[in-house]
Image: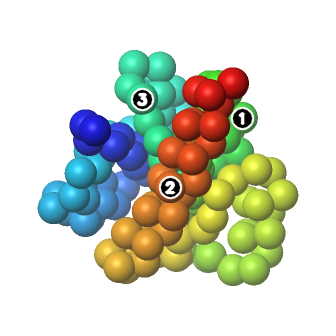
Amino acid sequence: MGPVTILAVSPAEEDHLLLSHVFTHSNWKCETARTCVEALEVLRRSGVAVVICAAELPDGTWKDVLAKLVQPVPPRLIVASRLADDRLWAEVLDFGGYDVLGMPFEPPEVIRVVSLAWRQWQHESRSAARC
């Protein structure tokens, strides 16, 4: 199996650098986008398994990105926020997102959450392929 593609959507360059560093020693390739529009361009051209999206973007929110994840097996969306609390977590789950990561990012937690999201996406992809 080739590298697994993760999409990091954030207007902050430091978020991209940290996430790219976290995935350096893994089989995960980290694509980046700064806006909803850029994220949609990456999603169209790359087979993305997991999206880590900042709660607020210059041209929308995580909800706008989530609404565009309409592939046969959409990537799992993880919302990243400095205000990660139970309310946001419940909202993300209610809207169909996968999970919430608090910021600043803690590499072990990023690896744990992304790994679980990828496993769920992979399981659903294999099930869909059998149908």
Q: Residue at x 48, y 53 (%)?
A: 118
Residue tagged by mark 2? 119
Residue neighbourhood size for the residue with mark 2, other residues' Cα within 10 Å, grouped as few (<14), some (14–19), many (≥20)? some
| Residue under the image location 47 percent in, 20 percent down | 44
Can residue 17 be seen here? The reply is no
Amino acid type of disc 3? Gly
Q: Which mark is residue 2?
A: none
The label on residue 47 is 3
Q: Is residue 72 depicted above or below 5 in this figure?
A: above
Q: Along the horizontal axis of the image, is 67 left or right of 57?
A: right
Q: What's under tag 2, amino acid-wise?
A: Arg
Task: Indicate the amino acid at tag 1.
Answer: Ala
Residue 130 image position (x, y, % from top left): 62, 28
Image marks 3 and 1: residues in contact by CB distance under 8 Å: no
Q: Which residue is mark 1?
A: 67
Q: Position of residue 85 (x, y in %)?
A: 69, 80
Q: How many marks?
A: 3
Q: Secondary structure at mark 3?
A: loop
Badge 2 or badge 1: first in the primary sequence: 1
Residue at position x 80%, y 51% in the image: 95
Q: Are marks 2 and 1 in contact (CB under 8 Å)?
A: no
Say what secondary structure mark 2 lies in.
helix
- Disc number lying in front (3 or 1): 3
In terms of sequence position, does the residue under pointer 2 or pointer 3 come before the other?
Answer: 3
Disc number lying in front (2 or 3): 2
- Crowding near the residue tagged with mark 1, few <14, some 14–19, many ≥20 C-alpha atoms within 10 Å: few
Mark 2 to mark 1 CA distance (whole Å): 22 Å
Find the distance from the CA under tag 2 to the CA under tag 3.
15 Å
Q: Quadrant of the N terminus?
A: top left
Of 99 and 123, the residue lying toward us: 123
